[in-house]
Image: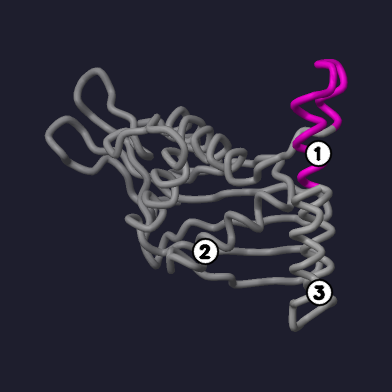
Amino acid sequence: MSLHNTVSSYIANAPDKNLATKIGDELLKLSRAVVKHHTFPEQQRYKYYLAQPSRMLAREVYRWNKSLCRMLKRNPSLRNSWGLRLKRSLPLELFDTLKTTVIAYGWGQVTRSTNHVENLVITEEDHFKSLILSWSNKFRCQLQETEVLIKVENDGGYSRAVVDAARPVKIKYSKDQEMLTLSLSYGHWNRVGVPQHSFYRG
């Protein structure tokens, strides 16, 4: 009852009554869901689970790094030489959270935005690594900087992502399918640091 009174008082004194009413209604709905989630029998609680896009995105981005690192190979396929392509099913709320972060921190920019498609590009390696590292560790530390977008071989050679203006990270998102496609380049260096890749081959 106290929360209801607080919301009613907020709406009554707000300069924008329409906006205040929307905020108040949503706050009351969320509060009721929280109470039900914690007090209802366990088999009914799932109905009132409050999804948190940020936590879901943190787990998702952490998986991106694991998947991309597994794809790093010293001998790439001829079909996609020195290129990686990752497709992930991603709810729109999570993509909006990701896009907002990329723009807010200046890590990248939107190159296309329609009712059906959104395209982002990131042209600096440090920016893409910051995105991966910050989201992966947002709620708990689970990824070290030395583990971001790199794979070290037993002989000391290594493969890692290469991001610059000529080889940007491209993020394409289909709003209709809620599908994200991430594309980027990588290279391989032997144990003494000599590049074994060529971006102009083929």
Circle 3 or circle 1, nearest the eye: 3
Residue 156 visible (yes or no): yes
Return the disc, 3 or 2, that comes first in the chain's sequence.
3
Q: Secondary structure at mark 1?
A: helix
Q: Position of residue 113 (x, y in %)?
A: 70, 71
Q: Residues within 10 Å of mark 1 (few under 14, many from 20)?
A: some
Looking at this view, is 91 or 88 the one in front?
91
Mark number displayed over residue 33:
1
Gap in angstroms between the C-alphas marked 3 and 1 = 24 Å
Tag 2: residue type?
Val
Gap in angstroms between the C-alphas marked 1 and 2 = 38 Å
Determine the main secondary structure of the stretch shown in magenta: helix
Return the disc, 1 or 2, that comes first in the chain's sequence.
1
Q: Residue at x 34, y 43 (%)?
A: 187
- Relative placement, left or right, of 170 versus 180 is left
Q: Residue at x 48, y 50 (%)?
A: 184
Gap in angstroms between the C-alphas marked 3 and 2 = 45 Å
Tag 3: residue type?
Ala
Q: Residue at x 32, y 44 (%)?
A: 197
- Which residue position holds label 3? 12
Q: Position of residue 196 (x, y in %)?
A: 27, 40
Circle 3 or circle 2, nearest the eye: 3
**Direction left: furthest residue:** 192
Circle 1 or circle 2, nearest the eye: 1
Mark 3 in CB contact with mark 2 (< 8 angstroms): no
- Relative placement, left or right, of 179 versus 17 is left
- Which residue position holds label 2? 121
Return the disc, 3 or 1, that comes first in the chain's sequence.
3
Q: In terms of image quadrants, where is residue 147?
A: top left
Q: Is residue 14 above or below residue 39?
A: below
Q: Which residues are magenta?
A: 30-47
Can residue 113 be found in the magenta stretch? no
